[in-house]
Amino acid sequence: MVLLDCIVPGQPVPKGRPRAFVCRGFARLYTPAKTVAAERALALLVRGVARPTCGLPAHGNLRVKLAFVCARKPGRRPDLDNLVKLVLDALNGVIWADDNQVTELKADMVISGVVSPRTAITVETIRAVKDGEAA
């Protein structure tokens, strides 16, 4: 069953690396503000378009398909894995209870100077395979 099939307009945002600072002799970590803002915005948008009858957040194994269309920026190319991480983390507690439920993942990235940037997200449930059963 398809739980989510949506297109998020705008330049895809990669997950930023945690930053560290020292306070009173102890190292403290924080997530960059751009990452936090992008995760919150994505979660809010998805809450508005997700199928309310699906009993979200879903439980069980899930298949996720992501397609990122990024605007061409000279000398800058986002890492696909960081784009994926931001989406998976943003949808924790929204579409699924935890992103460890994603057992199938397909992600593509296209760099384009012509097409408007966007992220396409599809999430489907996967029937559990029992021991001795063919997948």
Image: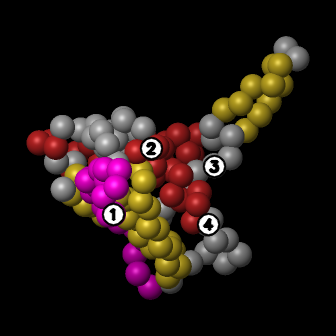
Q: Amino acid at mark 3?
A: Gly
- Secondary structure at badge 1 equals loop
State the residue position of label 2.
99
Q: Nearer the viewer, mark 4 or mark 2?
A: 2
* 4 and 2 marks in contact (CB < 8 Å): no
Mark 3–mark 4 distance (CA, rounded to whole Å): 11 Å
Q: Position of residue 79 (x, y in %)?
A: 62, 65
Residue 135, quarter of picture: bottom left
Residues 13 and 2: in front is 2
Mark 4 or 2, nearer chain start:
4
Q: Residue at the far bottom: name it.
A: 114
State the residue position of label 4.
78
Mark 2–mark 3 distance (CA, rounded to whole Å): 18 Å
Residue at left offset 18%, top offset 37%: 55
Mark 3 or 4, nearer chain start:
3
Mark 3 or 1, nearer chain start:
3
In the image, is 28 to the left or to the right of 86?
right
Residue at left offset 50%, top offset 73%: 109
Q: Which residues are magenta?
A: 114-135
Q: Position of residue 33 (x, y in %)?
A: 59, 40
Q: Amino acid at mark 4?
A: Pro
Is 47 magenta? The answer is: no
Mark 1 or 2, nearer chain start:
2
State the residue position of label 3.
16
State which quarter of the image contains the N terminus: bottom left
* 1 and 2 marks in contact (CB < 8 Å): no
Q: Amino acid at mark 1?
A: Ala
Mark 1 or 4, nearer chain start:
4
* 1 and 4 marks in contact (CB < 8 Å): no
Q: Amino acid at mark 2?
A: Asp
- Secondary structure at badge 4 equals loop
State the residue position of label 1.
135
